[in-house]
Amino acid sequence: MALFLTNEEVERLVTVEDAIEVLEPTFADLGAGRLSSRPRTLNYTGLGGGEFYLYSCMDASVPRYGVHLIRMTSEHLSRKVVKGFPRRYQIPNPAGKFSGLIIMFSIEDHAPLALFQDAVLNRTMIGATSGIAAKYLSRADSEVMALLGAGWLAPTQVVGHCAVRPIREIRVYCPTEEHKLGLCEAMEGRVSAKLIPVASTEEALEGADIIACATNSYEPVFDGAVLKPGHYVGSLQVGELDDLTHETADTITARAREPATIWHMKTGEVPADQLWLERWKPHWNHKLKFLGEIVEGLDHGRTSDDDITLFGGVGTGPSSGLGLQYIPAWVAYNRAREQGIGFEIPDELFLQDVHP
């Protein structure tokens, strides 16, 4: 029987550190061509007034663990201005709920093994991916981190970076005071680094080795003119970084060679994600590297301590998701089987007597 696992169950079963352990060799497999992975596809339906229905999906076969994963979301999106910043805002349904699902199939017998609510796995794998990128792109002696953003994705950014670097201090800034203070309080004891709420972006960036952006902003959240030799910048969201940051970076690392594909109606409004994908400048191409190839040892993340390195660009935020990033679901599934956790769904509800 297939298992169904909720967000609450997944959170008990797999940590960011667990996710790094399985994701790092999986990215190496991507770099070496030992797996197939399809980048995110986004299909927008305009609803008027700047709102959209969005269906998105991505999938990957991961022979190392014998599974194929697909992640699907169904959501309403709009722009919301928060303290002067236009942000990507997900609108709940009338019941106050959101819809996202991961299905994991067995490569051996092509049957479904498990279904997962996706929110916790999503932020876990994002934190793990950011940690892996920081391991290969930041200086080994990085001790001070600026964290811009204190929302849903911020806690796993803290854990992911602290898992790979000797971070002793994290300066946290976001426009919403209660989020900033809440994150610092919630992470106390989870990592050895000291989290310090600060009053401005400039205060967060002063003396930082790592700049980690974890916002939902469509506008740049810091000025690329502040970048200095040795900086590492990580970004999660399309629009967080200005052109000057891309111009200044010595290298720009993305998750995959293939960009996301965006579909929308020919009439009506164009989604913001499409506009941000179109901002890539051809003269940045020579800087572009790929995380899997770096992890596999086919390329170098940085060539000196003075390099300014960036994880984002072409592969930032919703433009870059990869199905392989959900391989921590394999850890959750195996632990759930061992511990007797999850709701079992009879195979006959999925398997058919005739081929489709």
Image (tube, rainbow, N blue to C red):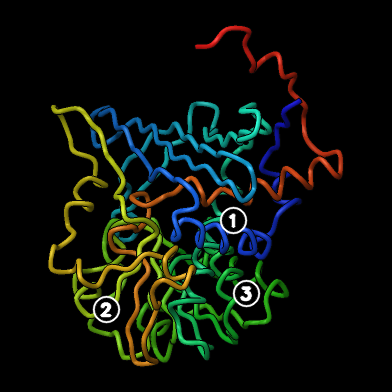
Residue behind mark 2: 249
Q: Disc 3 marks which amino acid?
A: Ala
What residue is rendered at 20% in x and 27% in y?
Answer: 265
The answer to whether marks 3 and 1 mark residues whose Cβ atoms lie closer than 8 Å is no
Q: Which mark is residue 100?
A: none
312 is higher (above) or lower (below) than 5: below
Q: Which amino acid is tagged 2?
A: Ala
Q: Position of residue 186 (x, y in %)?
A: 66, 67
Residue at mark 1: 124
Residue at image point 59% right, 77% down: 164
Q: How many residues crowd mark 1 within 10 Å: few (<14), some (14–19), many (20+)? A: many
Q: Nearer the viewer, residue 295 or 8?
A: 295
Give residue 158's quadrant in the image. bottom right
Residue 292 against residue 278 in the figure, above or below: below
* Viewer-side residue, 122 vs 303: 303
Query: Which quadrant does the N terminus fall into?
Result: top right
Could you give the CA–CA distance between mark 2 and mark 3, rounded to whole angstroms? 24 Å
Q: Provide the residue designation for mark 3.
A: 163
Q: Position of residue 336 (x, y in %)?
A: 79, 43
Q: Residue at x 68, y 81 (%)?
A: 192
Q: Amino acid at mark 1?
A: Thr
Mark 2 or mark 3: which comes first in sequence? 3
C-alpha distance separating marks 2 and 1: 27 Å
Mark 2 or 1: in front is: 2
Query: How many labels sit on residues?
Result: 3
Dot 2: what SS? loop
